[in-house]
Amino acid sequence: METFPDKEERKVARSLLYVGRGGQGSDVHRPYSALRIDVDESCPPKFTVRPYICDRHHHQWLERELQPLAIA
């Protein structure tokens, strides 16, 4: 979500990243994903997409970051 000058909040991106679940019984991994998109001020703009993963495992949150993707 991003807030624009007219104070309206709009969705600017949507993550369809699927990481998958793994394990069985009490050893199940439950990952959740999000994206961060950085925009460079160059002309034309360059985008860096950074996927983040939070994994719920044994009642603890584990964070990991996948390799960023550069779009020029």
Image (cartoon, rainbow, N blue to C red):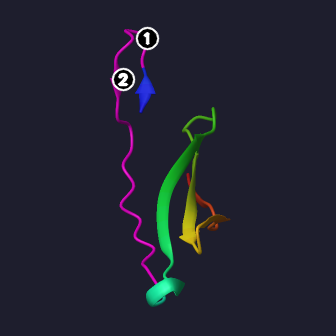
User: Which structural element holds mark 2?
Assistant: strand
- Residues 40 and 24: in front is 24
Numbered disc 1: secondary structure: loop
Q: Is residue 55 magenta?
A: no
Q: Quadrant of residue 59?
A: bottom right
Residue beneath the point at 51% across and 78% down: 29
Classify 44 as above or below 36: above
Compare residues 29 and 20 and report the one nearer the observer: 29
Residue plotted at (55% across, 47% down): 36
Which residue is the site of mark 2?
9
How crowded pointer 1 is (Cα within 10 Å; few <14, some 14-19, many 20+) is rated as few
Q: Is residue 12 above or below residue 59?
A: above
Q: In what quadrant of the picture does the N terminus appear?
A: top left
Q: Which numbered mark, 2 or 1, is in the foreground of this view?
A: 2
- Rounded to the nearest angstrom, the CA distance separating label 2 from label 1 is 9 Å
Horizontally, is 15 left or right of 41 in the view?
Answer: left
Label at residue 5: 1
Q: Position of residue 5 (x, y in %)?
A: 43, 11
Q: Residue 21 bears which disc, if any?
A: none
Magenta-highlighted residues: 4-22
Q: Is residue 9 magenta?
A: yes
Amino acid type, mark 2 = Glu
